[in-house]
Amino acid sequence: MLWPQVTMHGHPWRMRKSSSRSTLRGQKGFSEIDLKLETVSQDALRRTIFPLGELTKDFVKKIAAENKLHHVLQKKESMGICFIGKRDFEKFLLQYLQPRPGNFISIEDNKVLGKHQGWFLYTLGQRARIGGLKEPWYVVEKDGVKGDVFVAPHVDHPALFRELLRTSRVHWIAEEPPAALVRDRMMECHFRFRHQMALVPCVLTLNQDGTVWVTAVKAVRALTLGQFAVFYKEGECLGSGKILRLGPSAYTLQRGQSRPRVASQGPGPDPAP
């Protein structure tokens, strides 16, 4: 169903009401928001208008007013932490969070390299600025219980790469779960866990509780607990699951350790393998 054509700043727009329960990747307006749509209910998607494209916020609010969507007009503005501007990220967070001092520890020899003010200040894969060290070290694991942050000496260190993860119960958009996955208990598709990252070929293995194991065809850098793995197949966004557990890193596998250290961002439920 095509809605009336709207012209703004000389640009024609066609706003289409979504008639299906799925979302397609690659259409204008979807590339920026498909990592949000993967958690939306099917019923809501049926009544959703896409795309907003380059429409301004004020113009969208005007549409809302014409359709008597007063709760949209009254909703307060929200900002993500990425909008804090050019300032010291660590100092900004410590204005709101209590410091939890801990150690920077080398993943290779367990040597303490320095101190930090809280494991929650660091993201896997980022450079860890450790006082007294000129060479770059990168965060590869975090222990939210002991407060330790494990680091490695290269941006492409094998401790940063993993092939396996497990998600929470997956929210499927169109099918719950896809018929092919139910039939075979396994399914090839693609996934991503960060906005605009390249899609990664993978194999999903369905568990009885609705969670999935995700096995990447190629090891992925800086897989992170708490992020959402979003699944795609043939250009369609299928759904997502929160990353709850990570498999051993390439570094752990290279060393042949039988009990790999599992990255942890704090206490919480950890589903059994």
Image (cartoon, grey):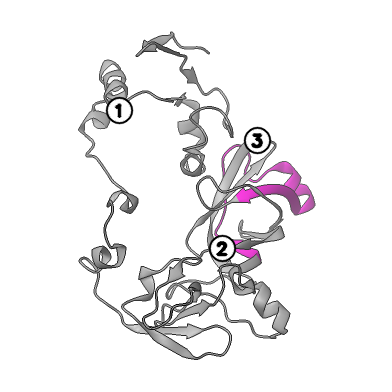
Q: Residue at x 25, y 67 (%)?
A: 91
Crowd class of label 1 (few under 14; some 14 to 19; many from 20; radius 10 Å): few
**Image position, residue 34 (x, y; %):** 51, 39
Badge 2 marks a residue whose secondary structure is loop
Query: Of label 2 and label 3, which has the lower sequence position?
Result: 2
109 in the magenta segment: no
C-beta proximity under 8 Å, tags 2 and 3: no
The residue pinned by badge 1 equals 57
Badge 3 marks a residue whose secondary structure is loop
Q: Amino acid at mark 2?
A: Leu
**Image position, residue 130 (x, y; %):** 39, 78
Q: Amino acid at mark 3?
A: Gly
Seen from the viewer's position, the closer of residues 179 and 18 is: 18
**Residue 146 appearing in the image:** no
Q: Is residue 57 left or right of residue 148?
A: left
Badge 1 marks a residue whose secondary structure is helix
The residue pinned by badge 3 equals 235
